[in-house]
Image: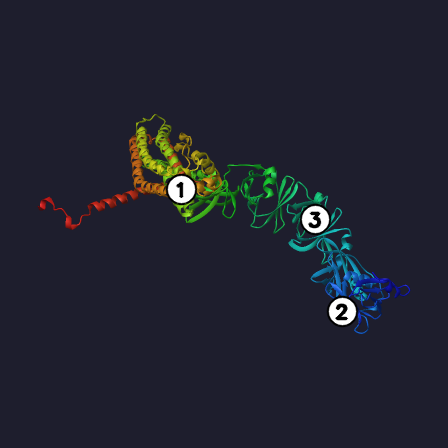
């Protein structure tokens, strides 16, 4: 504020338009006085010094030109180099604009005016160089297209106001300050000459930059354009050519918005227009009008197969929902295909959806993401099916699987075969993995190997039928002796699998835990629980197999032959198996005793059962049903001991202890319990290794011997009955069922074939034979020096 002394210096009609403290100097200015400066509406600068304690009060004025220098964000005002009063200070751009409009323009001398001050979208004024092009001007990397400017004006003091959609869909105001009015006039003249966007679509609009894909002249075109909303109308404008490419009605045209609001498809007279948005303003403003419940744009997908007589190419497809119709829009051609959801049936497996047109036997496969909304959308409107003979190849080509006496046929429609394989060419089927309800099956045929993916429940049927169809034509030519021998071998394999399979899987699992669990304490905890519960299950299994396997053979034989069979042979097999069971249990009990010595580590049975159920799934239960009456052990035992215990469920048990028994484990560490655990664990493993290397080969041989005796005693009955073609065919069916059983994996978490596990069991006989041979060689070897003379030489 100016004081009375300064006011006394003012002329008639003169007043202060700007004041400040300091910023000036003159020869005898006091050191401690109050210093005030003001600029009047006449352009005079008046300075006041109170003089302080020792000096005298002074008022000095300055009437010369004021130098103005533009800096980045501030403006510098200074006096000329001569005169008693000098000043040099800075002020904000907004302050200077107010000052510049309040005093005569000739009072200012601009040192640099090649640049202008710009205030852009609410920022502070910044010094910038304006670059003029044909249809726009640029500054600091920003551009202002004249066609998007709705209004442009400037005042006599050099401040220009520009309003419009300068960038994207935002409506903004831009201010320019330049004291050179001629420069501003050039901007205004160029704007007036430029065609305006609102001349095409009117004012009061919302702009949305989009990428448009559409078909014109038989070609697919793609370009960056502007979508303009005005009331119920939407315009697609090519600003470069100043043309409206297309106009839509929000009410009457069909709008399909993607759930993430970045894409939309508009259908006008059944012609599609694909829009990709840079922003979501269209969704924000027209949410209630544009987004319809029964018009959905699910996204871009890869689809294989055939539907409605059309093959799906390897190209992206936009999938739309139109009330009760599914629309397929091919991205590369913008060709549209419509299918009524009422005509479709679906099968879903994790990230895959099969689209089945059962009437025409057509099939498509849709790949989706785990949480894709299309899964829920289709599920609400389409009938779902299970247990269909369908699948897909490794390159996601879906198919219906058909099989007859001659070949396997993989079809995508009634009259379209994907490929086919003669049953006679198939050499092997192997299950190599699972995903959801589907299994990966590796087919070996001719000189080729191919992976296909089938419902797990379908795999046993495929293996069974292929074997059956391949061998059935030659069954009549096979002798009764040879057919009976084949059946006994397979039945014997089945017995070995259930009698010894858990032990060999336990041996394999122990090795896996040893290799994978590095921490000794964790490894011992995993091993003791796995071994303890596996041995418990094995003891139950031995009893069940010894009792019920002979019973299943007896019942199956009576069903096959249609007459009563004497029980003597079967009871003899039961007695032999029970005797072997008793011997094996002796070894298992010794292992169990060593494990029980550290029972504090063993998880309670109820908790272990829950732990296993959470970590391990059982698969291929359907093999019992598929193999029919030939394999009845699971049915006879009520499922007791049917599923093997595998090591995967027992790894990571340290998590159980850390969460359930941390305090007790800590006490055990203090008491050195883990050293004790390691001692007994080593003892248990030694006993187990001895049993597997020495005793099990003997027990396997004994089981084979017992089974041979039984089958040998039954041979005359079967061989006589096999002269009947119906009985011969029935025995062949049982052979094919046993064959199927051997080709399936042990478990859904263990892809090893049962056949391979049986080979390991039978291979143990070779280990036993080699060991016996070694002993025999050691006994027969006698050094020359201690040879006993022959009796005849004495």
Circle on res. 673: 1
Q: Residues within 10 Å of mark 1 (few under 14, many from 20)?
A: some
Badge 2 vs badge 3, beta-carbon distance below 8 Å: no
Going from the N terminus, do you reach mark 3 or mark 1 first? 3
Going from the N terminus, do you reach mark 1 or mark 2 first? 2
Which residue appears farthest toward the right when viewing the image? 12
Along the line of sight, the residue nearer the viewer: 3 or 791: 3
Q: Position of residue 38 (x, y in %)?
A: 82, 64
Residue 749 seen anywhere in this rendered image of the structure:
no
In the image: residue 583, left or right of residue 302: left
Badge 1 vs badge 2, beta-carbon distance below 8 Å: no
* Residue identified by numbered label 2: 112
Label 1, label 2: how many angstroms apart (C-alpha)? 88 Å
Label 2, label 3: how many angstroms apart (C-alpha)? 45 Å
Along the line of sight, the residue nearer the viewer: 381 or 677: 677
* Residue identified by numbered label 3: 282
């Amino acid at each position: 504020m100016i004081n009375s002394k300064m006011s006394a210096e003012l002329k008639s009609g003169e007043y202060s338009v700007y004041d400040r403290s300091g910023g000036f100097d003159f020869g005898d200015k006091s050191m401690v006085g109050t210093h005030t400066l003001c600029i009047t509406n006449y352009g005079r600068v008046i300075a006041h010094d109170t003089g302080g304690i020792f000096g005298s009060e002074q008022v000095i004025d300055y009437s010369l030109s004021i130098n103005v220098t533009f800096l980045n964000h501030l403006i510098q005002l200074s006096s000329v180099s001569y005169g008693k009063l000098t000043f040099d200070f800075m002020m904000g751009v907004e302050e200077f604009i107010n000052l510049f409009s309040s005093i005569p323009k000739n009072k200012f001398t601009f040192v640099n005016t090649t640049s202008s001050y710009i205030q852009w979208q609410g920022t502070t004024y910044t010094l910038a160089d304006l670059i003029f092009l044909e249809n726009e001007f640029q500054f600091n990397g920003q551009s202002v297209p004249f066609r998007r400017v709705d209004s442009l004006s400037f005042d006599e003091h050099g401040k220009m106001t520009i309003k419009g959609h300068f960038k994207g869909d935002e409506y903004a105001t831009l201010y320019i300050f330049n004291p050179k009015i001629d420069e501003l006039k050039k901007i205004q003249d160029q704007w007036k000459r430029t065609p305006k966007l609102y001349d095409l679509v009117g004012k009061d609009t919302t702009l949305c930059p989009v990428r448009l894909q559409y078909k014109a002249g038989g070609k697919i075109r793609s370009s960056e354009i502007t979508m303009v909303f005005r009331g119920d109308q939407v315009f697609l404008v090519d600003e470069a050519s100043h043309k409206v490419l297309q106009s839509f009605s929000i009410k009457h045209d069909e709008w399909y918005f993607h759930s993430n609001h970045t894409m939309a498809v508009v259908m006008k007279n059944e012609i599609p227009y694909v829009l990709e948005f840079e922003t979501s303003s269209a969704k924000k403003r027209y949410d209630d009008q544009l987004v319809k419940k029964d018009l959905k744009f699910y996204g871009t997908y890869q689809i294989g197969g055939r539907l409605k007589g059309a093959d799906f190419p390897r190209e992206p497809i936009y999938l739309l929902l139109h009330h009760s119709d599914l629309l397929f829009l091919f991205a590369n051609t913008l060709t549209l295909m419509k299918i009524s959801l009422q005509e479709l049936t679906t099968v879903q497996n994790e990230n895959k959806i099969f689209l089945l047109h059962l009437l025409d036997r057509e099939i498509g496969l849709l790949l989706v993401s785990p949480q894709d909304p299309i899964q829920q959308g289709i599920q609400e409107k389409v009938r779902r099916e299970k247990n269909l003979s369908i699948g897909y190849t490794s390159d996601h080509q879906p198919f219906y699987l058909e099989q007859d006496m001659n070949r396997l046929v993989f079809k995508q429609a009634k009259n379209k075969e994907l490929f086919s394989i003669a049953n006679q060419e198939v050499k092997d089927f192997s299950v190599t993995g699972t995903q959801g309800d589907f299994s990966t099956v590796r087919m070996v045929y001719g000189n080729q190997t191919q992976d296909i993916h089938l419902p797990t429940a379908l795999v046993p049927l495929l293996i069974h039928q292929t074997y059956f169809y391949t061998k059935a034509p030659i069954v009549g030519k096979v002798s009764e002796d040879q057919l009976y021998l084949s059946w006994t071998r397979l039945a014997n394999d089945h017995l070995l699998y259930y009698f010894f399979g858990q032990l060999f899987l336990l041996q394999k699992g122990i090795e896996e835990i040893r290799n994978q669990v590095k921490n000794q304490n964790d490894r011992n905890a995993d091993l003791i629980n796995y071994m303890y519960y596996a041995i418990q299950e094995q003891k139950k299994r031995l009893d069940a197999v010894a009792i019920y396997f002979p019973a299943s053979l007896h019942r199956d034989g009576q069903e096959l032959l249609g007459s009563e069979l004497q029980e003597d042979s079967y009871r003899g097999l039961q007695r032999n198996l029970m005797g072997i069971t008793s011997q094996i249990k002796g070894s298992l009990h010794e292992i169990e005793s060593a494990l029980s010595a550290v029972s504090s580590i063993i998880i309670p049975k109820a908790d272990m059962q829950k732990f296993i159920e959470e970590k391990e799934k059982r698969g291929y239960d359907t093999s019992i049903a598929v193999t029919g009456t030939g394999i009845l052990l699971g049915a006879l035992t009520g499922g007791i001991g049917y599923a093997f215990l595998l090591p995967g469920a027992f790894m990571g048990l340290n998590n159980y202890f850390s969460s359930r028994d941390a305090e007790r484990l800590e006490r055990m560490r203090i008491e050195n319990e883990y050293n004790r655990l390691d001692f007994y664990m080593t003892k248990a493993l030694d006993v187990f290794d001895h049993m597997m290397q020495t005793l099990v080969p003997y027990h396997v041989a004994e089981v084979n011997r017992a089974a041979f005796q039984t089958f040998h005693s039954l041979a005359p009955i079967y061989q006589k009955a096999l002269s009947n073609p119906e009985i011969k065919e029935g025995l062949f069916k049982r052979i094919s069922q046993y064959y199927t059983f051997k080709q399936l994996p042990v478990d859904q978490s263990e892809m090893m074939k049962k056949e391979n596990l049986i080979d390991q069991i039978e291979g143990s006989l070779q280990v036993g034979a080699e060991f016996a041979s070694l002993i025999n060689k050691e006994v027969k070897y006698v050094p020359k020096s201690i040879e006993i003379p022959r009796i005849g030489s004495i």
